[in-house]
Image (cartoon, rainbow, N blue to C red):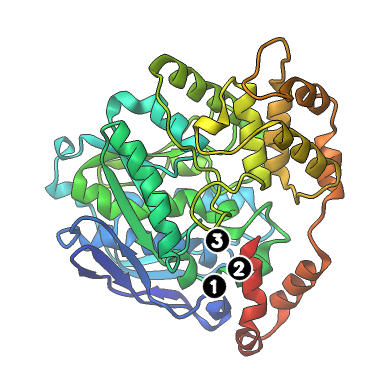
Amino acid sequence: MSLVVHEPAIDGSAIECEVTPPRELRRFFTGEPFRVEYDVDVSSVPRAIATIPVLAHVCPVAWANGVDVDVPVVDSTYLDSLEHVRSVLSQMYPTFMDGGEIHASEVVDTRSDRSPADFDDCGMLFSGGVDSVASYVRHRDERPTLISVQGWVVSVDEDDRWDTVKRHVNTFAADHDLDVQNVRSNMLSCLDTPMLQAHYKRFVDGAWYSSVGHGLGLLSLCAPLSDALGFDTVYIASSHTEAFGQPWGSHPDIDDNVRWSYTRGDHDGYELSRQEKVELVAEYVDSTGRKFPIRTCIHDGNGGNCNECEKCYRTMVGMVLAGIDPNRFGYEMDERTFEATREALERRAFVMDDHTVFHWQDIQDHVRVDRDFPIDGATEFFEWLATVDIEEIAKSASTPVHHKLIRAAARNVPYPVYNSLYPVYDRLNAE
């Protein structure tokens, strides 16, 4: 049997699409219809474009189980893209990506009634973090429209937290005279993300969406928006460089081949490590005198930086190494922060996956102490950091045993049993 994507219903700025999974895939879906909302009217967007967001999120689940997907209509360029992405993911994850065909009742070339001249602007997926700010710096002459997505890091039911995130992005946009578009989708609550996490965590280094789906998914959410506003390019900031060498859900082989109509995805900054991006932002700040918040996490409950998680520590350390005072960019840091970072690393307080190790080693590779730093205690900290075996720290900090047991159980229980125990599995979302 196939996974069935039904006819998209377009109502003003919103698109909704029912999804009917076959029995063997029901555990990976909650039963909610897929929904996505925009700041602009998308009622004139072709149906073949309107199905793109939902296809991007259900296809990887189907491919991971060798299941075909039936869809009423799809853009011909995007259909080619999906076949390419399926091949890439199958090469990345040969242990579980079995493939699956896409059967469309109607394949439409949406370029036939449009002109390339209609698509002369660009969009940029933008979180306000280091990667996306560096991408803005690289492409600022193009004046990209910044695109924020609610539904991944901030869920669709966290409106108060999302309001804070929007204020951060809107402040950056206003200071740089840019437009902002917000996209809101239940893509990770339409999917049963805790069950996907439980079932596939043994195969991936990170969460399901990060490891498998977010490049294809986030870019594809922008398809109706790009059609309405005339974007020829949607930039998505890279997470790693070629040196990382591990599978990840956003990669040039995926993102650069996500296309529809006259629009293409662009995996930006792959040649730059995260620390090199921090240094690029530092150069931009130094040359322009600008000051703006950089958003690393939302763990403080208010949509800002918590200043005490691994990613906040790592980002602050990288900023100081590049000569930036984190206190000017939305963080709270002093000499005690270096002490807390060292203590957390030494006692293996962080569960560190391959990409976290990669980023800490990148900082180590750029350590230099023959300069003045904006925070006291930096020189001593970097002298210590240069001697640390990050891989050994990561090996010593393992996933809690009870999480492993929950995942093992979730992979094997019948769907009705799993459904009754859903609150237990839902705790995996916190990872």
- Horizontal arrangement in the rendering, residue 7 relative to residue 116 (left or right): right
Percent x, y of residue 314: 66, 37
Amino acid at circle 1: Asp
Residue under pointer 3: 99
Total numbered labels: 3
Q: Residue at x 20, y 43 (%)?
A: 230
For the residue labelled by badge 1, is the local secondary structure a helix, a strand or a loop?
loop
For the residue labelled by badge 3, is the local secondary structure a helix, a strand or a loop?
loop
Q: Residues within 10 Å of mark 3 (few under 14, many from 20)?
A: many
Mark 1 and mark 2: span between their CA atoms?
A: 6 Å
Mark 2 and mark 3: span between their CA atoms?
A: 17 Å
Q: Residues within 10 Å of mark 2 (few under 14, many from 20)?
A: many
Amino acid at circle 2: Leu
Residue under pointer 2: 196
Residue under pointer 1: 192
In this view, the residue in front, 188 or 258, is: 188
Q: Are marks 1 and 2 in contact (CB under 8 Å)?
A: yes
Q: Residue at x 69, y 28 (%)?
A: 362
Give above or below for 219 relative to 95.
above
In this view, the residue in front, 112 or 60, is: 60
Amino acid at circle 3: Gly
Give above or below for 97 relative to 367.
below
Percent x, y of residue 20: 42, 79
Nearest to the eye among marks 2 and 3: give it. Answer: 2
Which sits earlier in the primary sequence, circle 3 or circle 1?
Answer: 3
Q: Point out the image quarter for the C terminus.
A: bottom right
